[in-house]
Amino acid sequence: MVRTVLGVVGALLALYLVIAIVIPALFGLLKFVLVLGVVALIVVAAVTIVSKSSK
């Protein structure tokens, strides 16, 4: 009986961990990568424009 109760408590704790920590961390990482990609795109565009205008 104790083993079953501890299994259920462990499953609930794992579900809480996924919902409360893992999913927001993944969204934060995705947002960081998206912002980094936009900044890289702006830098590449600026370098391309400067290099074409100097010729």
Image (spheres, rainbow, N blue to C red):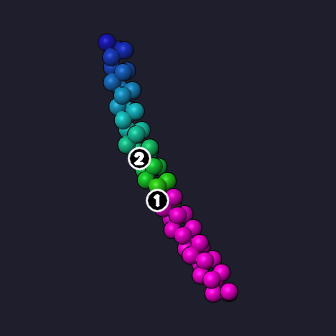
Q: Residue at x 40, y 33 (%)?
A: 14
Residue 55 or residue 14, whichever sits in front? 55
| Percent coordinates x, y for residue 27 in the rendering | 43, 53
Ranked by sequence position, the earlier of labels 2 and 1 is 2
Q: Secondary structure at mark 1?
A: helix
What is the quadrant of the N terminus in the image? top left
Left or right of residue 54: residue 42 = left
Q: Dividing the picture into quarters, in which one does residue 49 lie?
A: bottom right
Q: Dividing the picture into quarters, in which one does residue 50 lie?
A: bottom right
The type of residue carrying mark 2 is: Ile
Residue indicated by mark 1: 31
Left or right of residue 54: residue 28 = left
Q: Residue at x 54, y 63 (%)?
A: 36
Magenta residues, dominant SS class? helix
Q: Secondary structure at mark 2?
A: helix
Residue 14 or residue 35, whichever sits in front? 35
Total numbered labels: 2
Q: Look at the image and give the residue range highlighted in magenta.
A: 33-55
How many angstroms separate mark 2 from mark 1 (CA)?
12 Å
| Percent coordinates x, y for residue 13 in the rendering | 39, 32
| Percent coordinates x, y for residue 2 in the rendering | 35, 14
Extreme top residue here? 1
Extreme right residue here? 55
Residue indicated by mark 2: 23
